[in-house]
Amino acid sequence: MHSSDAQLTWGSPSCIHRRPQVLYRSIWPCARYRDGFRSVVCALPSSAKPFPRKSARDSSGDSSRSSSGDPPADAPRSPAGSSTFRYQRLADQLTQALRDRRFPPGSRLPSVRELCETHGASLATVTHALHRLEDAGWIEARPRQGFFASPASADPPGPTTSTPPRLPEALDARRERLMALAAARDEYLSLGHLALPDELLPQAAFRRLFHRHLRAPAITTATVAGSARLKQRLADRLNRRGCEVVASEVVVTQGEGESLRLCLEVLTQPGDRVAVTRPVPLRLLELLHSRRLQVVELSADGALSDGGVDSDGVDADRVDADGVDSPLVDSQRVDRSPSGVHDAQRLVRALAEQIAADPPVLCIVDMTSSALAGVSWDDDSARALVSLCTRHDLPLIECDLFGELPLRPDAPRPLKAFDPADRVLHCGSTACITGVGLAVGWVASGRHRLQLTAARAVHGELLPGLTDAVMADFLAGPDADRHLRRLRRQLLRRMQDWTAAVLAAFPSGTVVQAAPAGHQLWLTLPQGLNAVGLLTAARQHGVSFVPGAVFTAGTALDACLRLTTAHALDETRRAAVQLLGRLASQGLA
């Protein structure tokens, strides 16, 4: 039986689903929504506050732990509104005692009863605290003997608190300034942001479809995860690209950003380690940091945790907090220009080495973005990556924003096409073909569809029936294919025009990499130039682009920048490209 078809059983009002960790917890006896074909219990996040209700079990006093795995009933929060439970404070105290060697490695801790008396805590609170220390590697339990300080407690694997390691403060401040510097503003001509111009959008088709459905009931309806008809249309398009997806496995969202957020909510907890290909899509990197996840960036050169020393030898702890004011010329920079196209098998090997050294809980791959850095994907590499993740039971999120816009006949198939075990969560959006105003996103995953739908029911807005109906009609009829053929031809022509203009304008040694799909150009400046400094200089002339530094948590992409080729290369944009080339040449002089 397919794992996603397993029936949920609900034996009590407090229900729990584990991954092994808690994903969602329901505190109401019945919270249901319709998912088109069945009724699914809607599970709520553990942070949600229930309506006041006391069960018979609570009132009887015979159990201090709820069946859901919630914190003990006697675990009051700390003063001043702190969210720390009493068991966590006790765990912190015991951790400090272990750090101070009051319990040397191998020594026996006081019994549970002694700890209850010493700290004035209940049996449930003490037991929960000890389990936290055991999970973190500080102590170990021995049958019929009690708890003992771990032999490795002098250098444990990690803290017991829920706060994960943070980026170096200087790098945090630098990234905040970079984001402000790279933001699109009306007063600047942006050469790097991805929005499609109006002339490339299917406006006539949408006007006709909206006019048709404005007279239908669609305007008064909404769905949690998309109508069955829209799901079928999205599944059909994926299957045309080599995937094997059924409509019931598709969860419709309001864009790729929401799709990624739902996947991270279902599959991760704060502090988890996540491997992701570099350059990291900008929105994805912000989502990872907002959930306080530890990011391991994968490239053909190996793996790199955020913070610390980059692969190029630059120590992130020594980065100037005012890094956005970096000079155009970086006298201490080593040559970061790619030596050529790298086989994606090198990236797969980097992930295998990371799994062997410190396994992540999740891997995220964007084949288009990694191709900008010179990684060459083919079907064999994609198959090897999915096989590696399947062998290690590692969920794999595929970011596929530009999958419908291949610019070459040998473009690789999606990772989902090599996924018989259903380990890949395929995330995409129609924004690259319809514009952001009418975009819908999706996650295709049979294994996780129930959890994703439950998460969307709790945290997401309902999907308007009008948008749903219009997009289903657009994707089902000839309009979509006709528009895509025209869009691909125009994007390919414009990509060629922009590439020629950049190569003519920029100094010798500039490496230009065209995306295999979509409308992105990735430039690596010659040795010694800093793209952030180039952006600072360009803004003084009213021109902006997106620096490569915002696509990583470190400094390895400081010499890179992204341009978009969606707009026709008119005289204004051609002059802007020539301006950037002159500024870069002056930096080398």
Image: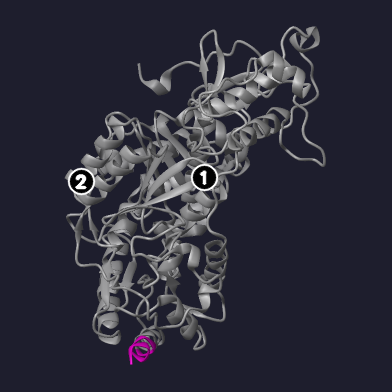
Given residues 149 and 160, the one toward you in this image is 149
Q: Which quarter of the image is occupied by the C terminus?
A: bottom left
Q: Quadrant of the N terminus?
A: top left
Residue closest to the eye, 259 or 486? 259
Pinpoint residue 11: horizontal percent, then vertical percent.
60, 10
Residue 192 at what x, y percent from top left?
42, 72
The spot of residue 99 in percent (x, y) is 59, 37
Q: Amino acid at mark 2?
A: Ser
Numbered tag placed on residue 381 in the rendering: 2
Extent of the magenta region: 582-589
**Image point 44% across, 56% down: which residue?**
431
Q: Earlier in the sequence, mark 2 or mark 1?
A: 1
Membership of 300 in magenta stretch: no
Indicate whether 364 appears above or below 547. Answer: above
- Residue 46 lies, in percent from the top left, at 64, 30
Q: Secondary structure at mark 2?
A: helix
Quickly name the residue at label 1. Answer: 261
